[in-house]
Image: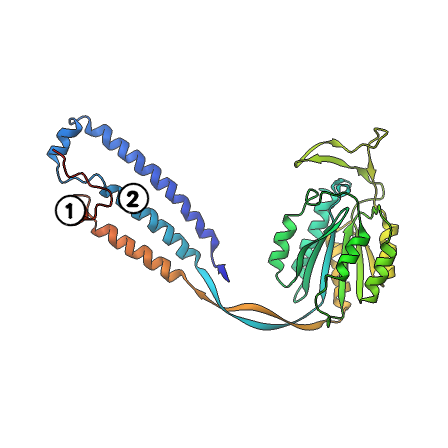
């Protein structure tokens, strides 16, 4: 396992194309100036020791120097060993609705982005808890297994959109059923499922799924995203909106928040329904419920004793810099013997 200490130093790599452009411009300028003094064969006879390949070698050295200097300043750090770390927390699984109705813009910027923002801000507040992620529309799919890696959770969250699941609908029951199999620690008593949706369920069976979740010790908090007034459902194809969804009667489809279903699901598991109008208020309410739950101690493995690796890259850069100092631009016998660039020997 590795991590980058100062990744912004990778911007130094932008110097490489700049150096190449400057070198190309300098060579063109040299050719233009030499034309004023004579033809190329005559100049070669006047300066027989001038090497044509040494400048290219020195350019290559400077490109490598910039590369290794940049990586050295970034300082890759390698985890040398794994150790068990004891944490206290709960197991929390997010179930995010990614059906087309989540693109409705009755909340800004739209329901899906609002739900993702609530999840992201909640991750910022969590300490020691394990998190997982499920996405669902017409079907439910696991997106992120339960983990303590909040960085991975944020990364997976960024990739979520309404195109990720081909079958449309809002199968809350299937998301709950998947969650009952998702929690991987049988000793963990406090399990929380947070469902973020507009509540438009087109299938039955959510009551039975909620009762089964309660039997397995899973509490459900539902977060309603949207307004009861609702709005038209955008018709988005390949990331572009081409209009609004229409039904068979050619009427624009309007999607509304359905809080009644979400209230029922939450009550069946002794949970709570939260109207996600305010991101801050929703996150505070969610964290308040999490803090009420008893924390379970568990162990997780993390990489420890990260060792700096910058010295190797800076050392190589220094050696290349010394090599550049000792490589002269005139021809040398030992360089001819190497034949790296096939130095011309029959220039007459």
**How far is mark 2 from mark 1, CA to CA?**
18 Å
**Position above or below: 47 against 214:** above
x then y, percent, for residue 124: 65, 58
**Position above or below: 196 against 246:** below
Q: Secondary structure beneath disc 2?
A: helix
Question: Which numbered dot is residue 46?
Answer: none
Residue ID for mark 2: 59
In the rendered structure, the answer to whether residue 202 lies left or right of residue 56 reads right
Residue ID for mark 1: 332
Sequence order check: which comes first, mark 2 or mark 1?
Answer: 2
Seen at 37% across and 40% down, the residue is 18
x then y, percent, for residue 204: 87, 50
Seen at 12% across and 37% down, the residue is 48
Query: Marks 2 and 1: which is nearer the front?
Result: 1
167 or 273: nearer the viewer: 167
x then y, percent, for residue 317: 33, 55
Q: Neighbour class for label 2 at 10 Å: few (<14), some, many (≥20)?
A: some
x then y, percent, for residue 197: 78, 49
Quadrant housing residue 29: top left
Q: Neighbour class for label 1 at 10 Å: few (<14), some, many (≥20)?
A: some
Quarter of the rendering occupied by the C terminus: top left
Cβ–Cβ under 8 Å for marks 2 and 1: no
């Amino acid at each position: 396992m590795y991590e980058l200490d100062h990744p912004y130093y990778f911007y130094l790599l932008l110097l490489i194309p700049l150096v190449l452009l400057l070198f190309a411009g300098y060579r063109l300028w040299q050719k233009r100036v030499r034309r004023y003094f004579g033809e190329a064969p005559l100049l070669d006879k006047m300066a027989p020791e001038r090497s044509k390949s040494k400048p290219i070698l020195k350019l290559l050295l400077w490109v490598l120097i910039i590369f290794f200097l940049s990586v050295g300043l970034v300082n890759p750090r390698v985890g040398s060993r794994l150790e068990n770390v004891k944490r206290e927390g709960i197991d929390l699984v997010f179930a995010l609705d990614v059906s087309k109705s989540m693109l409705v813009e009755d909340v800004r910027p739209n329901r899906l982005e609002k739900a993702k923002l609530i999840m992201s801000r909640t991750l910022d507040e969590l300490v020691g808890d394990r998190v997982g992620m499920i996405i669902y529309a017409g079907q439910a799919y696991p997106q992120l297994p339960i983990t303590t890696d909040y960085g991975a959770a944020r990364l997976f969250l960024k990739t979520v959109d309404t195109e990720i699941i081909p079958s449309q609908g809002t199968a809350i029951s299937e998301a709950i059923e998947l969650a009952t199999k998702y929690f991987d620690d049988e000793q963990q008593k406090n399990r929380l499922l947070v469902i973020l949706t507009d509540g438009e369920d087109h299938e039955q069976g959510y009551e039975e799924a909620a009762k089964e979740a309660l039997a397995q010790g899973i509490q459900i908090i539902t977060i309603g995203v949207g307004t009861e007034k609702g709005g038209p459902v955008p018709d988005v194809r390949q990331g572009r909106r081409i209009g609004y969804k229409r039904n068979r009667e050619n009427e624009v489809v309007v999607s509304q928040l359905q809080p009644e279903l979400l209230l029922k699901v939450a009550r069946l598991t002794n949970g709570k329904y939260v109207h996600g109008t305010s991101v801050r208020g929703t996150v505070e309410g969610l964290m308040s419920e999490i803090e009420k739950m008893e924390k379970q101690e568990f162990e997780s493995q993390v990489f420890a004793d990260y060792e700096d690796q910058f010295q190797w890259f800076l050392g190589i850069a220094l050696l290349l810099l010394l090599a550049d100092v000792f490589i002269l631009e005139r021809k040398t016998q030992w360089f001819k013997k190497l034949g790296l660039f096939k130095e011309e020997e029959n220039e007459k």
